Image (spheres, rainbow, N blue to C red):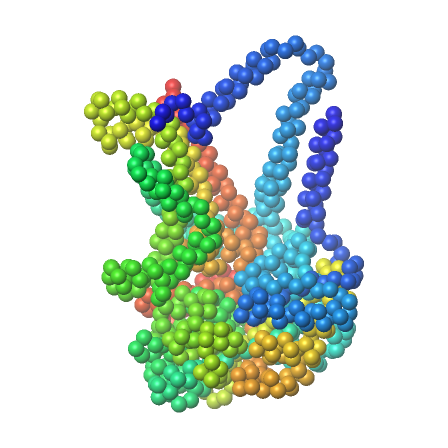
Amino acid sequence: MRSLRAAAAFAAATALTATACGGGTATGGGSNDSPKTLTYWASNQGPNIEADKKILTPELKKFEKQTGIKVKLEVIPWSQLLNRILAAATSGQGPDVLNIGNTWSSSLQAGGALLPWDAKRFGEIGGKDRFVPAALGSTGAQGKDPAAVPLYSLAYALYYNKKMFKDAGVEKPPATWEELVADGKKLSKGGKWALGAEGSNLVNNIHQAFVLGKQHGSDFFDDAGKPTFTSDGAVAAVKQYVDFMAKDKIIAPGNAEYAQNQSLQDFAKGKTAMVLWQAAATTFEAHGMKPADWGVAPVPVPSGTPGADKQVNSMVAGINLAVFKNTDNRDGAVKFVKFMTSDAEQTVLNKAYGSIPPIKAAQKDAAFARPETSVLRDTLSKSAAPLPQVPNESQFETTVGTAIKELFADAAEGRPVTTASVKSALTKAQQQMPKS
Amino acid sequence: MTALPLAHDEAAPGAAAHDKADTAAARKEATGSPPRDRRPRGRIRRIALPYLLLLPALLLELLVHLIPMAVGIFMSFKELTQFYIRDWGAAPWAGLDNYSLAVDFDAPVGEALLHSFFVTCAFTVVSVGLCWLIGTAAALFLQDHFRGRGLLRALFLTPYALPVYAAVITWAFMFQRDNGLVNHVLHDQLGITDGRPFWLIGDNSFFALATVSVWKHWPFVFLIVTAGLQNIPKELYEAAAIDGAGMWQQIRRITLPSLRPVNQVLVLVLFLWTFNDFNTPYLLFGNAAPESADLISIHIYQSSFVTWNFGTGSAMSVLLLLFLLVVTAVYLLLTSRGRKATDG
């Protein structure tokens, strides 16, 4: 009988483990059960994960010195971050504080895994007014308490190779798309190409198509949050982007399969003369370029100068900081958010990453007035628009991003890209969107 | 090499049946000889013991396989989207909605699933067929002793020993259009293709996928068939040779029929692995596979994880499970009937 009892005990233990795995902490809005430690998931902002650890660790030590709270850091690559967050949300077992891509704010907000930031909680970190409005526009659906607070802000700019411009007789960076195509034809010669693209990178495809959509007066979603992928503006925007390869032939066909920043390598090797990118400086330097080799200009617009509405020339890119609802150190987590968004830390961190602080006071630092960062800063404050803040944003990235990838594949293999073929690809994408 | 005495030690499926018979005989002897235990407690203990010994395995099986499967089936009846991720017990019941969405082949979601299913079928036939052909041929060639046979055998098994991730990522680099080794050889050195073809996007991606899959799996066939060949008595070949059978006839009349039980299991396992393969397409193509290489596993991944619709994803998984169950059952039924016929 002893063996039976042992087996029963084993069974009970197994059952317990099973429930422990699936259960998670049941508390609703977090607790303060372990006030002395925090777990922090940071996104990969530097050239690699080690670089991030090097930048963040001294700052976390400062926080520990001030508050006595020890922060356990884990830097998570972008390819895994969203899946890790989803797993954490489902199981209830996750970090206390985490970085999210700001375009995921509404999607994650809908799942209810993140602590909402109402006026009172914003008060604990110094108030909403400290933040740049454009950055706050990417923290969740309108009319709801933000799901996160802005941490690093970024915007797109046009990076160009000064020597290649000079050799081709192009005097200044293009300010309109027409100029870009005209200059591009001069630059695309002898195995060199004018513009780089990441045709198989769904997210990057979306960023470019979204901005062109804005310029064509289309948002990809209507006010009720319903997809409008097949509107004339959306079709024209996607066609214009793919046509840089298909019709204008200023993007190398090989770029259709790029998805791992190969276009930045091509730029650094002098194979392409321009890329549209956010904070690319550290990567260029890592590939052996010197800061004097490249110039930075605002992304072109249809005509005139960058501004609001149809003159938008970037999405509001950036990283938000969120508190996980199941945290067992809620007060400590809010303190940590306050620390990370303080003027001093914002200056240190954004300087290290080449991004722009979403805190007004921190933007005044001289470091953010250098030519590159001032282009990003001006774009962000004057001519950047947030991606649609709807719960289905991530599905939009997948379906439309895939459609553009397939259209690039058509262009690269010499199949025609027409208004009809673009429209049919976008129709298919829209049909795959969830009904709700 | 003396094949016969060794036959029992080899881990070939044929040997299992013998073992079973032996143990049954041994048990009969064992129960017969000692004095009978009349006490009921002892009998209970004796009856309970095998089950107790099985219990840990059963529990783990439950934990690792059956419970997640049941949860998956449960999820397929829920409208489990991003809105219910944190508390997915609260997700509303969807009834059969997820299923009707998946099998409505006139609508885009169902159409895409059906397309993905056909691509997977074609891919599986090509991959399993080539794997079997190459693996069996290699095993036959290496059956006879010659210098360097061990070295060749080790070399052939290398793809099987490499970590999948490292191997497939290397292939992804080789398939790159502008800097990849494949185009360098095909276009620059041999001049077979006119331009530099794409391998990771467009229609060619099917061939890229099949190449990597065959490269990865044929050593397994080689390994199993090599093991199976050790069980064929040499005398059969000697007798056949005396009767004037050539090499081709020996292969057709002796080798292949003797390998039948091995092949039955082998093809089934390969079919299941290939049909379900996720790593290869995911590492080659990332989140969104090109249409011509949109295998069902990655299609389901995209339908659930990338678009955050776990209910529909689960429904598709359940359908896939049912399909594989039916195929496996029919296959086992047919092959066992065939075996009985030959045995009888």
Tell me: A51 left or right of B331: right
Name the quadrant containing residue B129: top left
Which quarter of the figure is the N terminus of chain A placed in? Answer: top right
Q: Is residue B321 above or below residue A166?
A: above
Tell me: B303 left or right of A165: right
Tell me: B171 left or right of B93: left
- Answer yes or no: is residue B287 visible: yes
Of B195 and B215, the residue lying toward us: B215
Q: Residue at point 49% right, 19% down?
A: B21
x and y percentages locating residue A369 in the rendered image: 58, 87
Q: Residue at point 43% right, 69% down?
A: A262
Which quarter of the figure is the C terminus of chain A placed in? Answer: bottom right
Of A193 and A396, the residue lying toward us: A193
Of A281 and B301, the residue lying toward us: A281
x and y percentages locating residue B127 in the rendered image: 37, 46
Q: Residue at point 43% right, 75% down?
A: A268
x and y percentages locating residue A143 in the rendered image: 67, 72
- Answer yes or no: is residue B260 visible: no
